[in-house]
Image (tube, rainbow, N blue to C red):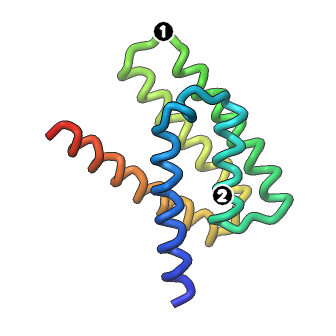
Amino acid sequence: MKTLLMTVLITLSVIALVRAQASEQLKNSTPEQRAQKMTDWMKINLPLTDDQATSVHAINLKYANENESLKEGASGRREKYKKFKDTQAAKDQELKGALTAEQFSAYLSKKKELQQKMREEVQEKKN
């Protein structure tokens, strides 16, 4: 029951985070601000230790900077998407080393739910 409640709370938090990320404020934020926001979310939803929070913040900042470079790059949309997917896979591998197995599993689960929610929202906009 406790796990179910935690899962529901994490899901709601992820949805709230996604909507916040879609806002203009976040679109115009710096990589540092985005990394901090993601780290804060992870501290709350994946109860991180202080050491984990430090490691996770460094990982989030590294990939926020890489994604900023991709966003600013001259590559085509398809190429940017492929590079973004590659950086996300690399980020996940680094996070796997910084999180416990349970935390990483919860992270992947919420990430998958988030992706599905985003797909649904895109479909709704198309209709």
Regarding mark 1 in the picture, which secondary structure is present there? loop
> Most extreme residue toward the top, as rendered?
74
Q: Is residue 3 above or below residue 18?
A: below
> Most extreme residue toward the bottom, as rendered?
1
Instruction: State left or right for residue 66 relative to residue 83.
Output: right
Give coordinates of residue 81: x percent, y percent: 42, 28
Q: Residue at x 46, y 39 (%)?
A: 22
Q: Residue at x 48, y 9 (%)?
A: 74
Regarding mark 2 in the picture, which secondary structure is present there? helix
Label 2: few (<14), some (14–19) or many (≥20) C-alpha neighbours in 10 Å? many
Give coordinates of residue 77: x percent, y percent: 37, 20
Nearer to me, 81 or 45: 45
Camera-near label (1 vs 2) is 2
Residue type at mark 2 is: Met
Q: Residue at x 59, y 41 (%)?
A: 90
Residue type at mark 1 is: Ala
Quarter of the figure with the C terminus: top left
Q: Is residue 17 above or below residue 49?
A: above
Q: Which mark is residue 90?
A: none
Q: Evaluate if marks 1 and 2 touch, with contact meaning CB atoms under 8 Å apart.
A: no
Q: Is residue 125 above or below residue 15?
A: above
Q: Residue at x 67, y 30 (%)?
A: 31
Label 1: few (<14), some (14–19) or many (≥20) C-alpha neighbours in 10 Å? few
User: Which residue was labeled with disc 1?
Assistant: 74
User: Which residue was labeled with disc 2?
Assistant: 42
Instruction: State left or right for residue 8 relative to residue 103.
Output: left
Instruction: State left or right for residue 66 relative to residue 11.
Output: right
Q: Quadrant of residue 61?
A: top right
